Image: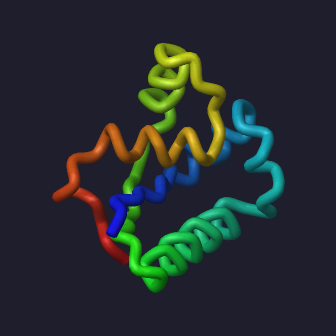
Amino acid sequence: MTNVSIALLSAADFELARRFMGELSAYRSYDDWVDWRHGAFMGLSIGGEDAGLVTVRLEPFLKWCAQNGVTPSESALDAFAVHSAPRDTRAVA
């Protein structure tokens, strides 16, 4: 099994993140995005991955991106979640 984190933002952070992450414009709403993220979690879990949902704050994520030369994206958000949340604090839906 692989440790995979699926990052979630708050509704307010999601709206702000749309300014920095163009790919978020593909989602009609915050709820639509959260549904996709939950779907990714479920798919990975059913596929045998050790997946978890991690709530991430936008400001530390953007700082992490700047410090590491990473373009803000959904995949970067997930990578940040892996590094920012200890394994035992991940929420499993």
Say which residue appears at 69% left-offset and 69% top-offset: 32
Q: Is residue 16 left or right of residue 93?
A: right
Tell me what residue is drawn at x 51 percent, y 50 percent: 9
20 displayed left or right of 58? right
Colouring chosen for the image of the structure? rainbow
The spot of residue 48 in percent (x, y) is 40, 79
Which quadrant is home to the N terminus? bottom left
Q: Quadrant of the C terminus?
A: bottom left
Please identify the residue farthest to the left as the structure is shown.
Answer: 88
Q: Quadrant of residue 92?
A: bottom left
Residue 49 in percent (x, y) is at 40, 72
Residue lying at the far bottom of the rendered structure: 46
Q: Is residue 2 above or below residue 64?
A: below
Q: Is residue 79 above or below residue 26?
A: above
Q: Residue at x 36, y 63 (%)?
A: 2
Q: Is residue 6 above or below residue 39?
A: above
Picture coordinates of residue 22, whole percent (x, y): 79, 40
Q: How many marks?
A: 0
In the image, farthest residue toward the front: 1
How far from the left and from the top, in percent, is residue 25? 81, 50
63 sits left or right of 14 in the view: left
Tell me which residue sits at (48%, 20%) in the image: 63
